Image (cartoon, helix red, strand yellow):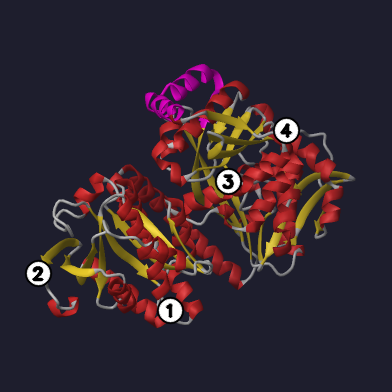
């Protein structure tokens, strides 16, 4: 759908007309106590209701919930403007590290001053003057998330030049939305009639009972909240981004919102379930004929069902019956929004600098940002329009995020130099030249009976589990020294092809990762085309991926090999295990369990192209693998 709605931000003359008979604003109060701000909540509510386009993010309920969750890290510094004894406007601000910002941000998608339209210019002028002259010890005031129709954006140019000289307005982003107006039925018919979405729904319905519903009780919503947070964190991590849900404060904030706003009021917490299990979530708000899709996510382990698109279809189907004006997709530059939205709303950041040399320097920097931002926006638009460039940009971002996390962890562990060296070597090996030689040990599993061996092992401190894709995302985000974000696409492709990734943990810590190929016929054909321990017998190939350093892994290898050998025996397949020369513990355990060397492999990489060379040892060879190599 094209950007055909061009008059959204146009206000009527009645909206902009300034009444002449109201009392002028005459004083300000700087509120630093939340109790005092709470005493003004009825005036706040009255002013909020005077705006027919008011957002949920400027309500007293939103501010109360946000303060309870995040307030310990901030100092309240709000400006209340009076006209005589009447509250004429509120500029809800907080301060941290010398920076002033709107109360409720950055969690809010939109922000603005709270006042009636007729007094907007007066309120803004007196509030900014008070900030400049009466509020001490601040370095910058940043008004983020301003839409084009926000009062602070529309009236900041009317400030006296002595104040306007210290303001810089910088384009920030574009938020996608669906404007309904007089084309409501046509818009929803086009959105809900997509053939691809119907096929996804039919596929899921064949898998079990499919249901989308909005949670109505706070108790049930609280029970679902951990799954929502986990899915959201994973969904953003796989894109190389930190989720807004990644802090414990956010979960507390949502719980406070449920109590303040109410699930049967303006708040909507939807869940898409398959056989009672949550596949996807949508957290939104329904205010003044508008639905705001605030946060949404889906289960990465159910990616083959494409649950995200079906979730969006379900939310739009709900909006068709309940909203009249607009469907806002909220913050974020996800490419799918271009397919659904018919309008994009530009947002801005307005920076106010204090008088003095430091303020002048920052003002010059912001002026440069004003001129640079359009160029950055054009580059981003070009990148989004070219799939190859978009993938390359995402890969670069994920690599940079993973490398930064890895070096940060190395700094904490005190191994910065070693980690930087390994990272450099990996980059050289990936893009320039690499060589990796391994021996492949084999064992015929047809005569294996290792249940007694497994039963004799002490497994109280260690366990072996099969990892799902979501587990790998958690690992990459929390333990970049084990797995980096840029490796996730390759891991996902291997899981999709039928390979499995096994994780060994000791006392809850990951100590081993290994890929296993050949459980399915297709995987075996592609993974082990030239390696068979016994001619005509299928083979399962184990290739160790990562192991902890400076730890005795003998018992962990013993448990892992025993379990994999048992599973291979159940499938009447032989087990092949890669072992490099720098893995003495693995080699020792292989020999202990009667594995014998059968192949020598060499993998060479030149300019990102990989080739593998395999040679077979003589059947009756008594050479050790290193000697045969």
Mark 1 vs mark 2: in front: 2
* Secondary structure category for the residue under label 3: helix
| Residue 392 versus residue 74 in the image, above or below | above
Q: Do the residues bearing badges 4 and 2 touch, measured as CB atoms within 8 Å? A: no
CA distance separating discs 4 and 2: 76 Å
Q: Locate the N terminus by quadrant.
A: top left
- Is disc 1 surrounded by few (<14), some (14 to 19) or many (20+) residues within 10 Å? few
Q: Identify which residue, 91 or 551, lies in the foreground.
A: 551
Q: Position of residue 106 (x, y in %)?
A: 61, 53
- Is disc 2 surrounded by few (<14), some (14 to 19) or many (20+) residues within 10 Å? few
CA distance separating discs 3 and 1: 36 Å
| Residue 178 versus residue 333 in the image, above or below | above
Picture disc at residue 618: 2
Mark 3 vs mark 1: in front: 1
Q: Kindly identify which residue carries mark 3.
A: 228
Mark 1 vs mark 4: in front: 1
Q: Identify which residue, 325 or 249, lies in the foreground.
A: 249
Picture disc at residue 265: 4
* Between discs 2 and 3, the one toward the N terminus: 3
* Secondary structure category for the residue under label 2: loop
| Residue 539 versus residue 433 in the image, above or below | above
Q: Position of residue 295 (x, y in %)?
A: 56, 43
Residue in the image at 41% along x and 36% along y: 305
CA distance separating discs 1 and 4: 55 Å
- Is disc 4 surrounded by few (<14), some (14 to 19) or many (20+) residues within 10 Å? few
* Between discs 3 and 1, the one toward the N terminus: 3
Residue in the image at 35% along x and 45% along y: 384
Q: Locate the C terminus by quadrant.
A: bottom left
Picture disc at residue 551: 1
Q: Is residue 195 magenta?
A: yes
The magenta-colored residue range is 178-206
Residue in the image at 45% along x and 68% along y: 456
């Amino acid at each position: 759908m094209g950007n055909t709605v061009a008059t959204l931000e146009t206000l009527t003359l009645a909206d902009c007309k300034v009444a002449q008979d109201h009392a002028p604003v005459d004083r300000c109060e700087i509120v630093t106590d939340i109790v005092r701000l709470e005493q003004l909540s009825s005036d706040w509510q009255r002013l909020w209701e005077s705006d027919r386009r008011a957002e949920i993010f400027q309500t007293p309920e939103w501010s109360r919930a946000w303060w309870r969750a995040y307030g310990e890290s901030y100092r309240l510094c709000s400006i209340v403007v009076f006209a005589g004894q009447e509250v004429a406007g509120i500029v809800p601000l907080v301060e941290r590290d010398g920076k002033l910002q709107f109360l409720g941000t950055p969690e809010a998608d939109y922000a603005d001053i709270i006042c009636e339209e007729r007094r907007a210019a007066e309120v803004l002028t007196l509030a900014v003057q008070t900030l400049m002259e009466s509020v001490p010890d601040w370095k910058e005031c940043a008004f983020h998330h301003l839409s084009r129709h926000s009062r602070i954006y529309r009236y900041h140019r009317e400030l006296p030049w002595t104040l306007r000289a210290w303001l810089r307005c910088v384009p920030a982003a574009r938020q996608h939305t669906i404007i309904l107006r007089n084309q409501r039925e046509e818009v929803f018919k086009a959105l809900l009639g997509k053939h691809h979405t119907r096929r996804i729904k039919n596929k899921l319905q064949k898998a079990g009972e499919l249901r989308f519903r909005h949670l109505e009780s706070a108790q049930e919503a609280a029970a679902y909240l951990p799954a929502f947070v986990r899915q959201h964190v994973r969904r953003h991590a796989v894109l190389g981004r930190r989720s807004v849900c990644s802090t414990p404060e956010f979960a507390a904030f949502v719980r406070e919102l449920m109590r303040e706003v109410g699930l049967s009021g303006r708040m909507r917490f939807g869940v898409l379930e398959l056989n009672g299990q949550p596949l996807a979530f949508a957290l939104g708000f329904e205010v003044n004929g508008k639905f705001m899709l605030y946060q949404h996510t889906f289960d990465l382990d159910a990616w083959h069902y494409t649950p995200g698109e079906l979730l969006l279809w379900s939310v739009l189907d709900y909006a068709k019956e309940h909203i009249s004006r607009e469907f806002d997709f909220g913050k974020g530059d996800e490419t799918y929004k271009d397919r659904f939205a018919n309008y994009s709303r530009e947002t801005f950041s307005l920076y106010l600098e204090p008088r003095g040399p430091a303020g002048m320097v920052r003002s010059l920097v912001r002026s440069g940002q004003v001129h640079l931002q359009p160029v950055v926006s054009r580059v981003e638009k070009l990148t989004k329009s070219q799939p190859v460039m978009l993938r390359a940009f995402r890969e670069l971002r994920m690599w940079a995020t993973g490398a930064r996390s890895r070096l940060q962890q190395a700094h904490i562990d005190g191994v910065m130099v070693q980690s930087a060296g390994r990272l450099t070597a990996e980059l050289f090996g990936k893009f320039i030249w690499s060589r990796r030689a391994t021996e492949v040990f084999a064992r015929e599993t047809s005569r294996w009976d290792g249940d007694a061996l497994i039963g004799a092992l002490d497994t109280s401190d260690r366990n072996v589990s099969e990892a799902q894709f979501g587990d790998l995302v958690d690992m990459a985000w929390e333990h970049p020294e084990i797995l980096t974000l840029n490796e996730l696409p390759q891991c996902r492709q291997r899981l999709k092809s039928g390979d499995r990734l096994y994780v060994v943990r000791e006392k809850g810590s990951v100590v081993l990762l290994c890929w296993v190929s050949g459980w399915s016929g297709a995987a075996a054909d592609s993974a082990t085309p030239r390696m068979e321990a016994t001619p005509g017998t299928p083979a399962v190939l184990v290739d160790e991926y990562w192991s902890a350093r400076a730890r005795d892994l003998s018992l962990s290898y013993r448990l892992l090999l025993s379990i994999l050998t048992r599973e291979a025996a159940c499938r009447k397949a032989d087990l092949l295990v890669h072992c490099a020369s720098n893995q003495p513990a693995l080699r020792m355990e292989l020999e202990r369990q009667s594995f014998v060397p059968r192949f020598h492999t060499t993998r060479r990489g030149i300019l990102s192209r990989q080739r593998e060379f395999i040679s077979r040892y003589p059947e009756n060879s008594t050479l050790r693998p290193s000697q045969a190599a």
